[in-house]
Amino acid sequence: MNKGIKISDIFASNVFDDAVMRERLPKRIYAELKNSMNKGAELDKHVADVVANAMKDWAVEKGATHYTHWFQPLTGYTAEKHDAFLTPTGDGNIIMEFSGKELIKGEPDGSSFPSGGLRSTFEARGYTAWDLSSPAFIHEGPTGAVLCIPTVFFSYTGEALDKKTPLLRSMEAIDKQAMRIVRLFGNTTATKVTTSVGAEQEYFLVDKDTYMKRKDLIFAGRTLYGAPAPKGQEMDDHYFGIIKERVADYMNDLNVELWKLGVTAKTQHNEVAPAQHELAPVYATTNIATDHNQLVMEMMKKVALRHNLVCLLHEKPFDGVNGSGKHNNWSMITDTGVNLLDPGKTPHENRQFLLILSAVLKAVDEYAPLLRESAANPGNDHRLGAHEAPPAIISVFLGEQLEDVLNQLCEKGEATSSKEGTNANIGVSSVPKFKMDATDRNRTSPFAFTGNKFEFRMVGSSASIADANIVLNTIVAETLRQAANILEQAEDVEMAAHDLIKKWVSEHIRIIFNGNGYSEEWVAEAARRGLPNITNMVDAAGCLTDPKSIELFERHNVMTRVELAAREEVAYEMYAKAINIEARTMIDMAKKEIIPAVIKYTTTVADSIHGVETAGYDASVQRIVMSDCSNGLKAMNDALIKLEASVRHAASFENFKERAVAYRDEVCPAMKQLRTPADALERIVDEKEWPFPTYGDLMFNV
């Protein structure tokens, strides 16, 4: 445990941030670099060389021997190639060198990452380019310290091969359109609007020695077999419960590593399921928050190994208990510090806020399939709508206060009041009185307003938050564009805004739902309202190339139709590959572990029957066990044969979409059919004979 550490002494100590640049760069170089960062001015070669040298000196002082262009390909993970600060001098010696050219540009293999056909195997060239908006940092590891330079990744022909490029484009799109609105409402001092995000991260911790005995966790990241433990989460005793010492030690080390990287890790607690936990940071600009969330996931895994633990980020590592997600808390803020989603004390009078709110409602309603797609991955198919996460139906929770304001607008034509929070008074004199919020929260809503931000709760725990924020930024940029086009032509902006708010709220009120998203009644009601219910990743992926989506992304220069088609293909490919790995792992475990273990146990029971009956005693109990085991074995073998056939058939499709559909419709049901008898056998077979650790071993052994 790291005792006695002052956060202020270590925070961002491994980040080449503004304070370090101001200290180490000549004033003129610093000013020119900031001009490039803030205004997009071209970076002079001389400036780049000076910055690179200063960055290298700083990194070497911290023990770095290598640098890397750190980027985020379409795998959803990060990628890096390390190069040493080493240049031969010709006399048998070397010097430590790092040029502006090396800082700005790198050339990884563009064909070895998912590209959706943008790069063929023989077309290898890809480029990484320095993202000035995200500071470089030092990554410490067993191989030493490495200077990591956040970069974008694109093809030789100019298409984005990563998640960061369209994210940065989307941030520019919403800045452009939001500034038009800000100017219309008289703000002449702000020069930029940025979106900010705080990404809450859920995860599981399991003992490493136990983990290593489960092929499914190793290969698939989740348990493909497993009967429920005698105790799960039904006692509600793990959520916010006392953190075990081993876990607390891990959390402490994790915090230190993240703080050194400038990640504002703030909140930590036990989550609902046994062995499940959560970490939440303070808000950051969306680009930085996305980088930081990638670092959070990397560090969670890395630090866990130091404690002989393994961090599981899969959305559903254990069947029957709470899965993991990450809540994407999204807001819009001017460079003068004004939160455009802050309703103020009297939201009914805050016309700018109500206009932006109505624009968000319109965006979420009209582009709900895109939002759903942005949270789609194979793991999330097991989580969404499973009474532990939001349903797959997109709706917006506003709460009593804002819903009342909007109802007044629709029904009376004018909002004249806002509900206020009451004073808390629980009848205990020792508890200070305070003013409560004006509205409750709704944990079943996929997209909930929570005071001065929207919380998009559908994102999966293993996913990059880039996808969700690319969509959020772009769809809201579009509706703000439409609003600005109308208001800029109006003689009376205030009155035109009033009329537009009323119109959009009336047209899109169907997206507002403050009730129980888990109920069957809501599913029926959502269908009546015409809201889409996209239940799986394969169906969600298709909306990327819908003409409406192509028009949206191309209008705002976020993604081209070629880039969108590539991402659709990557989605189908990644889905099919993930399910294929799971199915093959199930087959391997069934053939090599479960069936042999059950046969061995059945033989023991058969010997017992023979011995007991030979001695003249009743062996009826043994015969019942024997019958259950034999029937289970037969059911397993039949399901195993079916699964093998379905995998062969699914893999035979050349078309990525057809292959993904086959894995969804044939392989996934066959996997469930194999798991059912296997889990039933786990409840029967002697635990000493069962070939791998059980749910109880995994979730209660940390």
Image: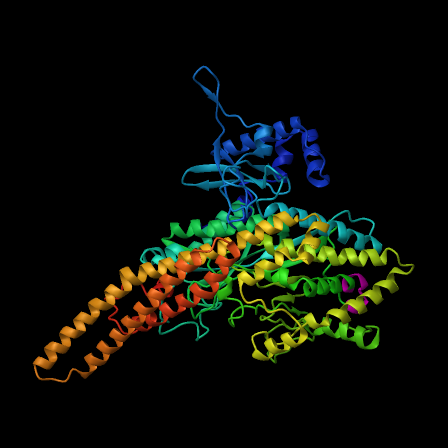
Left or right: residue 334 versus residue 444 is: right
- Which span is picked out in magenta? 346-354
Residue at x 73% of width, y 69% of height: 508
- Residue 574 in sight in this render: yes
For the C terminus, the quadrant is: bottom left
- Quarter of image, res 618: bottom left
Q: Can residue 346 be seen?
A: no
Residue 363 image-quadrant placement: bottom right
Is residue 397 placed above or below 14 in the rendered structure?
below
Q: Is residue 642 magenta?
A: no
Query: x and y percent of residue 152 in the render?
Result: 59, 41
Locate residue 698, reporting x and y percent: 36, 63
Is residue 312 rendered to the left or right of residue 175? left
* Residue found farthest to the top: 91
Query: As drawn, is 466 to the left or to the right of 194?
Result: left
- Up/down of 646 relative to 59, above or below: below
Q: Main secondary structure of the magenta part?
A: helix
Q: Nearer the viewer, residue 9 or 669?
A: 669
